[in-house]
Amino acid sequence: MFIHPRLEHCRRLFIRDYRLDMEIGAYSHEKNKSQHVVVNIEFWVPLEWNTPISDDLDEIVNHDFVRPGIQDIISRGHINLQETLCDAIVNLVLAHPKVVAARVMTEKREVYPDCLSAGVEVFKFKE
């Protein structure tokens, strides 16, 4: 795995295979119905802000803000594009004051009968 030099002194946190049922898709046959979407999220926090000394939850960045934030995004209603979903999630994660970079991958599982999934990925540094 390639690590960008800006992330060299960071800890990588992740949420793997977060399963959602949501309304997504730009085609007419995708409107007004739920689809299975799998989301993978990685984010990086400098070690100085995410290295516990006393084994205390207050000393780290906790994953707990991510899932409720995604639920809020999808509760707003139908999303046409996976790119829109990815961008919303990456911006949610980067809004955390200690996160310096994030990668979000989404996969729709019901797109093609001969493929496991079709997806989109975005990687972004905090400006």
Image (tube, rainbow, N blue to C red):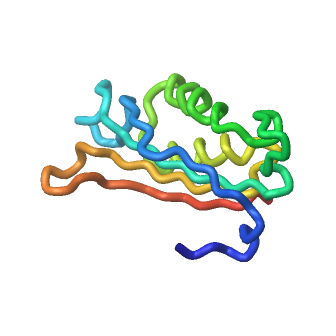
Image quarter hosting the C terminus: bottom right
**Which quadrant of the structure image shows residue 122?**
bottom right
Of residues 110 and 4, the one drawn nearer to the viewer in this rendering? 4
Q: Residue at x 67, y 44 (%)?
A: 93
Residue at (77%, 67%) from the top-left corner? 9
Direction left: furthest residue: 114
Residue 124: give x, y in percent of width and height.
Answer: 65, 60
The location of residue 28, given as percent across then percent down, is: 27, 36
Residue 64 vs residue 98: left or right? left
Please name the residue shown 84% across and 46% down the image: 53
Horizontal side, residue 32 vs residue 2: left or right? left
Farthest residue toward the front?
Answer: 54
Task: Please name the residue shown 44% across and 39% down the image.
Answer: 18
Which is more toward the observer, 12 or 76?
12
Between 91 and 64, the one lying in front of the other is 64
Q: Is residue 16 visible?
A: yes
